[in-house]
Amino acid sequence: MKRIFQLATSADLPAVMSLIDEARGIMRANGNPNQWVEGYPAATTIAADITNNHCVLCRDHDGTLVASFAFMPGPEPTYSHIYHGQWLNDDPYHVVHRLASTASSHGVMADVVAWCMQRSDNLRVDTHRDNTIMRHCLQQLGFTPCGIIYLANGDERLAFHKVTSHSKH
C-alpha cells in the first residue's frame, strides 16, 4: 500500500496530539509505562515541530492519518556523547523523533524509514529501553544498535543508526 507523506500545518495539531495519545496507550499496553510521561510530547513541542517544518504526517492512500513524526537534520545535541558504543560515522545525519501511529496501522515504521532514507542516507533514532515494538522494528529495518545516549533531563535512551551502502563508513 502506497502511503502519502506531507508536512503538517497548524491545523493538523489536534490530529497529531490525538495520534500521540493513542501511541502512548499502545506503549502502556505493551509494557512501556515510562516513555512519553508527564505530558511529553506537549502540544507546544509539536507546534514547534510544525513551525520548523519538521512534523511529517503519514496517510493511507485513502487519506486516513496513520502516523506522525519529527524528521530533522542533525546535529541532535543529545547525540553528541554516546556511551557504551559509537555511531557508525560522523557524517551529517537526520533524526526521527516522536513517531506516533495508530494501533490499526501496520508497516508504518517501514514506510517512514523508506521515506526518510530517500531524503537522507544517514539516519539516527533513539528509543526507550522498554519500547520493545520500536526496538524490534528498528532492528528489522537494518538499524544498528550503537550505544546509549542521555536526554537533556538525564533519561537514558538506546541509540540506533542506519546508513545506506553508498555512505562513507
Image (cartoon, grey):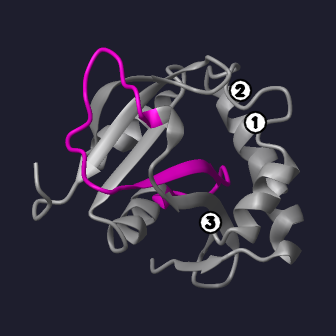
- In the image, taking residue 99 as reference, residue 10 lies left or right, namely right
Q: Are marks 1 and 2 in contact (CB under 8 Å)?
A: yes
State the image quarter where residue 113 is shown. Answer: bottom left
Q: For residue 54, which numbered disc appears in the image? A: 3
- Distance, label 1 to label 2, CA atoms, is 5 Å
Q: Secondary structure at mark 2?
A: helix
Residue 133 can be seen, yes or no:
no
State the image quarter where residue 6 is shown. Answer: bottom right
- In the image, taking residue 43 as reference, residue 153 lies left or right, namely left
Residue to which mark 2 is pinned? 28
At 83% from the left edge and 54% from the top edge, which residue is drawn? Answer: 17
Location of residue 29 in the rendering, given as x and y in whole percent from the top left corner: 69, 27
Q: Secondary structure at mark 1?
A: helix
At 64% from the left edge and 55% from the top edge, which residue is drawn? Answer: 104
**Range of residues picked out in magenta:** 79-108
Q: Amino acid at mark 3?
A: His
Viewer-nearest residue: 32 or 54: 54
